[in-house]
Amino acid sequence: MTSFDKPDIKSQSEIAIHAICGSYLMVAYSDGQFAPVEEGRLTSELAADEAFTRFDQAALNAEMAELMTAFSEDYEATTLDVLVSVASVKDKDVEKRAVKHAARVAVIADQAISPQEEHALDRIAMALGLDKGAL
C-alpha cells in the first residue's frame, strides 16, 4: 500500500497540536542548538498556561517527540510542513494564541534571541497573518 492509497487526514485538534509544537520547535531548532532545558520549558508552560488546557497533554508530548526527530533530520522541510499547519489555525483564536505563546516560549527557554530565531518568529507571524516582528 502506498501513501496515496490512504490519505493522511488530520483532525482540527491534530493540526492545532502540530502547529503549536511545531512553532515551538521551529524556533528552538532554528539556531542549530536545541538544549534539553528548552524541551522542559515548553512542557512546564503547557501544564501551566490556560491557552494549552484544551489540548491533550499526551498528544502534545507525542507530537513533540515526533517533530524533534523530524526537525533534526530535515529542518527546512519540517518548517514548511509546520507553517502550513500554522496558517490553517490563523482564524481560530485559541489555537492562534497558543501558537504565538509557544513560539515566544522557545526564545525565553534559552534566554537569548539569535537572528535565526527572529527569522523563525517572523515566518510564524506571517503564517498567522501578522506583520513581521509581531511576535
Image (cartoon, rainbow, N blue to C red):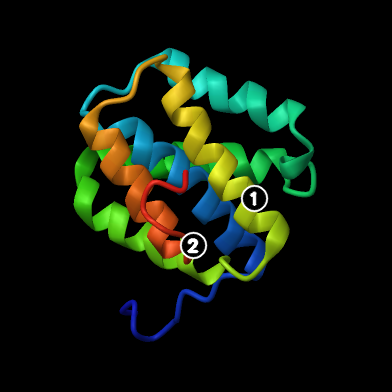
Q: How many numbered marks have been drawn onto this rendered protein structure? A: 2
| 2 and 1 marks in contact (CB < 8 Å) | no
Decide: is 65 above or below 85. Answer: above
User: Label 1: which residue?
Assistant: 97
Decide: is 112 above or below 45. Answer: above
2 or 1: tag closer to the N-terminus? 1
Q: Is residue 42 left or right of residue 44?
A: left
Q: Is residue 113 left or right of residue 102?
A: left
Q: CA distance from mark 2 to mark 1?
A: 10 Å
Quadrant of residue 36 within the rendered picture? top left
Quadrant of residue 46 within the rendered picture? top right
> Which mark is drawn over residue 128?
2
Decide: is 8 above or below 42. Answer: below
Identified at 42% across, 63% down, the residue is: 127
Crowding near the residue tagged with mark 1, few <14, some 14–19, many ≥20 C-alpha atoms within 10 Å: some
Helix, strand or loop at label 2? It is loop
Amino acid beneath label 2: Leu
Picture coordinates of residue 27, whole percent (x, y): 36, 37
